[in-house]
């Protein structure tokens, strides 16, 4: 915390005490006296001319805190340095404010203890005006006080008090804190002296920055004798006094980042020795026991380490971290409240929308009920009309039924006649299908007969060619007779095989011819049946026309009867036979 912030808290208490009627304003004469006292305590040259110049306006009325702050900042706080006694400054402000706000008759503590608690409050309070101490800092102070008194912390007692505190407010002002400690609520079982010693110890640590204190033996630098002194460790120095009442100060050991501390061996009949090295000289000190020795060594090392790092005292650093954490939590809480507010607004808008929808639904329900009433009236009227129309329709229906019965009889006769015609039509279709199948069988037989004739012609030509070659071979030379004879025998064997094949083809041709005759017979039967049905259909009102088979083209006549192929097919077969013959000649 900056020096200005610490001073402002005490000055705020003094200014508030001068505000007798609690209007937030103080008379100018009182402010002049306060300013003079502040300059005197803080060792600032007092300038009465500047004070008069600041308050020279014609307004004789009181001045508010905001009106006094410009003068306070410019002529006092901007000139202040850290060369004055803060305790005297705090006591001056305390003297101005405690009589108005504190009744000590019902408290277990003295005025000096109340002043120390007031100073601790200024140290731990938030940087907001009016000054208050939050629950977390209250707990921290009470824990410190309980430890200083040697008591045990009762968590349940503070939790009960915190519940009572939260039901009213979440913080205390300076006077409420003094009453809380002075009433002995958290020091039950402790006498007044113990409570006073505990308050003083906490005050020494938090306000006077005393990190450790106690009696130890110190070795002199001139006489080299050992003398008991009261040592008081602060972040940047160790002061030693004749006794703990601090009446007579014997000297200081200034600490900085270059100082050191180390343990020493026992000597000269002294135990638990350690040496503190500073820029000036070394100091040999003897603690009462090893535990005290280690505590002092560790405490001095901690101070030197903090000085090297440029960090404040541990309790001041811890207070700053707690404040930063509270600010962070407060920011998060404000953000959460903002979100909750946004959600609340959205919820209210949604509720309003739902209310509008409910009203719209109620209005729609009312309209629907009115519409339903009108619909029922219209439905009743329509039912009367429908009843009259139904009676009229029943009369017409009876007349129609009589006409339908008559028409049904005529329709049955007509349908019976149509059924007879359909049966005749199906029979005619069956006859036409038989004729189509007979023509297909005839075409298949013709193709088979043509193939057999072609193969027969091919074999005959081959035999003739073979015979010619054989005659030509016999007439050529007698020398080749034996060889030709052998070839002849081979070819005769082939000729015999060909003759057998020819005979087999002849048999197949005969079978095909028989099949052809059978098919022709079927075709004639189908033609006769068609003519018969055609005659029958002509007798039934001429509704159907018999389909005549198509005319046939000119057939080719062979030695064995009508051919099963045309002239073009015969030419194609002759061409294939000639190609086969040429290939056989080339192979020989």
Image: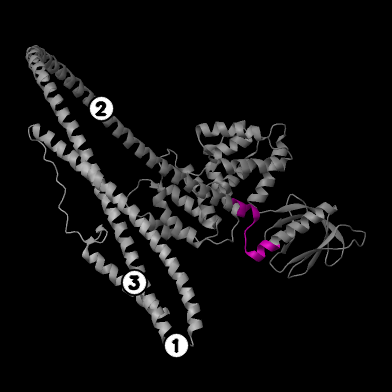
Q: Position of residue 455 (x, y in %)?
A: 34, 65
The residue mark sitting in front, 2 or 3, is 3
Secondary element at tag 1: loop
Residue 239 in view here? no
Q: Earlier in the sequence, mark 1 or mark 2?
A: 2
State if disc 1 and disc 3 touch (CB < 8 Å): no
Toward which corner of the image does residue 310 lie, by quadrant? bottom right
Find residue 461 and name its label.
3
Q: CA distance from mark 2 to mark 3?
A: 109 Å
Residue corresponding to mark 2:
361
Q: Which element is circle 3 on? A: helix
Q: Residue at position x 7%, y 17% from top?
A: 403
Q: Position of residue 567 (x, y in %)?
A: 21, 65
Q: Nearer the viewer, mark 1 or mark 2?
A: 1
Give the magenta range. Answer: 304-319
Using a 10 Å C-alpha cutoff, classify the residue at mark 1 as few (fewer than 14 neighbours), some (14 to 19) or many (20 or more).
few
Q: Is residue 133 left or right of residue 564?
A: right
Relative placement, left or right, of 491 versus 573 is: right
- Compare residues 376 and 39 and report the one nearer the observer: 376
- SS at circle 2: helix
How packed mark 2 is, by other alpha carbons closer than 10 Å (few <14, some 14-19, many 20 or more), is few
Relative vertical location of residue 96 with respect to residue 227 in this rendering, above or below? above
Q: Is residue 576 left or right of residue 117?
A: left
Q: Examine the image and state in which quarter residue 270 appears.
A: bottom right
Q: Which residue is label 1 attached to? A: 477
Split into 4 quadrants, where in the image is the C terminus? Answer: bottom left
């Amino acid at each position: 915390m900056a020096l200005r912030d610490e001073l402002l808290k005490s000055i705020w208490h003094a200014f508030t005490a001068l505000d007798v009627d609690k209007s937030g304003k103080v008379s100018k004469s009182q402010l002049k006296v306060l300013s003079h006292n502040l300059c005197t305590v803080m060792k600032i040259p007092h300038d009465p001319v500047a004070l008069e110049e600041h308050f020279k306006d014609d307004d004789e009325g009181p001045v508010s805190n905001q009106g006094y702050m410009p003068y306070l900042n410019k002529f006092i706080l901007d000139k202040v340095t850290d060369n004055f006694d803060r305790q005297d400054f705090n006591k001056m402000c305390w003297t101005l404010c405690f009589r108005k706000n504190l009744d000590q008759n019902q408290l277990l503590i003295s005025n000096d203890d109340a002043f120390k608690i007031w100073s601790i409050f200024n140290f731990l309070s938030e940087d907001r005006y009016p000054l208050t101490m939050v629950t977390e800092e209250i707990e921290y102070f009470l824990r410190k006080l309980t430890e200083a008194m040697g008591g045990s912390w009762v968590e349940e007692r503070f939790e009960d008090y915190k519940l009572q505190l939260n039901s009213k407010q979440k913080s205390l002002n300076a006077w409420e804190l003094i009453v809380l400690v002075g009433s002995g609520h958290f020091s039950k079982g402790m006498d007044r002296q113990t409570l006073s010693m505990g308050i003083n110890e906490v005050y020494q640590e938090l306000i006077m920055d005393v990190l450790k204190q106690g009696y130890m033996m110190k070795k002199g630098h001139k006489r080299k004798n050992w003398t008991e002194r009261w040592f008081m460790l602060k972040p940047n120095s160790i002061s030693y006094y004749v006794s703990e009442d601090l009446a007579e100060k014997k000297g200081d050991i200034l600490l900085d980042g270059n100082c050191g501390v180390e343990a020493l061996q026992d000597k000269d009949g002294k135990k638990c020795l350690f040496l503190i090295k500073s820029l000036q000289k070394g100091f040999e000190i003897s603690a009462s026991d090893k535990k005290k020795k280690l505590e002092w060594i560790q405490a001095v090392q901690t101070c030197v380490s903090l000085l090297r790092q440029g960090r404040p005292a541990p309790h001041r650093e811890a207070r700053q971290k707690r404040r930063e954490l509270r600010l962070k939590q407060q920011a998060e809480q404000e953000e959460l409240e903002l979100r909750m507010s946004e959600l609340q607004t959205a919820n209210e808008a949604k509720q309003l929308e739902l209310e509008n929808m409910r009203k719209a639904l109620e209005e729609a329900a009312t309209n629907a009920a009115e519409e339903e009433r009108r619909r029922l009236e219209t439905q009743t009227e329509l039912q009367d009309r429908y009843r009259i129309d139904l009676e009229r329709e029943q009369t017409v229906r009876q007349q129609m039924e009589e006409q339908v019965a008559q028409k049904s009889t005529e329709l049955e006769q007509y349908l019976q006649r149509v059924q007879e015609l359909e049966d005749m039509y199906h029979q005619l279709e069956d006859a036409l299908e038989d004729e189509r199948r007979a023509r297909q069988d005839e075409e298949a037989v013709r193709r088979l007969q043509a193939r057999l004739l072609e193969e027969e012609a091919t074999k005959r030509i081959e035999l003739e060619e073979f015979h010619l070659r054989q005659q030509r071979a016999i007439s050529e030379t007698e020398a080749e007779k034996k060889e030709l004879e052998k070839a002849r025998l081979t070819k005769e064997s082939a000729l015999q095989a060909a003759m057998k094949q020819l005979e087999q083809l002849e048999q197949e041709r005969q079978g095909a011819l028989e099949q052809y005759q059978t098919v022709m017979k079927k075709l004639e039967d189908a033609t006769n049946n068609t003519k018969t049905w055609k005659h029958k259909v002509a007798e039934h009102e001429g509704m159907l026309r018999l389909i005549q088979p198509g005319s046939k083209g000119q057939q080719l006549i062979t030695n064995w009867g009508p051919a099963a192929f045309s002239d073009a097919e015969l030419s194609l077969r002759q061409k294939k036979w000639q190609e086969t013959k040429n290939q056989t000649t080339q192979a020989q």
